[in-house]
Amino acid sequence: EVEVVQSGAEVKKPGESLRISCKGSGDSFTSYWISWVRQMPGKGLEWMGRIDPSDSYTNYSPSFQGHVTISADKSINTAYLQWSSLKASDTAIYYCARTYYDILTVAAMDVWGQGTTVTVSS
Amino acid sequence: QSVLTQPPSASGTPGQRVNISCSGSSSNIGKTYVYWYQQLPGTAPKNLIYRNNLRPSGVPDRFSASKSGTSASLAISGLRSEDEADYYCAAWDDSLSDYVFGSGTKVTVL
């Protein structure tokens, strides 16, 4: 059975850097994309971007381009989401999800991680 | 403000049918497939519908969906208490080069 497991909750101060992870198991990690989705407190879902772990090609939502970096290490079936300088407004739950694609665009996200809660506060 | 518009809430009594609408444009729903996600309280989202009206394995046939032009809808028939959740539509937007989610609809079982 395919599973995606994310790293644990983080509490950081504004200006600090952070990298959270998403490890896939049970199926070929490089056969699908991995997307990252943000959910701010009490709010809806926002797609941040995706990576193809087979070649690390990335696509970002225009809303998140330049604010975060998505990467992957296919040798350990892991994708990452990182910030170089966190803001209080980055406080949210971040989900990774196995992503199918249609004609090279994002389609369904069918296997989701449990979410990583990131809290940024001074 | 979301590119895809959903009503903020919907409700029904057990056994009833609830419909959730999702309104988009020619650059998203009018051009590509629509997906629906269910998010139970305190849990990660789950894919409920893919490619407009197809159910992944394990999703009950009480859930159905359709698309017409630049709008889509999700129907829950035989409403059950465990269907209380937030429901999101989603689609790729060609103009924005972005995967956009609807604003979400909270379904309450009365």
Image (cartoon, coloured by chain):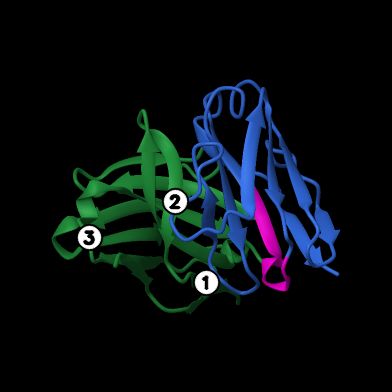
Chain colours: A green, B blue
Residue A93 in percent (x, y) is at 55, 67
Residue visible at 53% across and 67% down?
A: B44
Give percent across and percent down for residue A37: 50, 55
Q: Can you tell which of label 1 and label 3 is closer to the viewer?
A: 3
* Range of residues picked out in magenta: B80-88
A103 to the left or right of A25: right
Establish whether labels 2 and 1 are both on one chain.
yes
Closer-to-camera residue (A57/B41): B41
Check chain identity for marks 3 and 2: say if they share one.
yes
The residue located at (77%, 47%) in the rendering is B19
* As drawn, A32 above or below B14: above
> Of the numbered discs in the image, which one, if any, rests on residue A109?
2
Of callouts 3 and 2, the N-terminal one: 3
Where is mark 1, residue-wise?
A118
Per the image, label 2 sits on a secondary structure element best described as strand
Tell me the tag on residue A27. Answer: 3
Who comes first in sequence, dot 1 or dot 3?
3
Chain containing mark 3: A
Same chain check for tags 1 and 3:
yes
Q: Residue at x 19, y 46 (%)?
A: A54
- Image quadrant in which you'd find residue A3: bottom left
Where is the C terminus of chain B found, in terms of image quarters? bottom right
For badge 1, the amino acid type reads Val
- Amino acid at the residue labelled 2: Met
User: Mark 2–mark 1 contact, CB under 8 Å?
Assistant: no
The quarter of the picture where residue A103 lies is top left
Percent coordinates x, y for residue B108 in the rendering: 80, 65
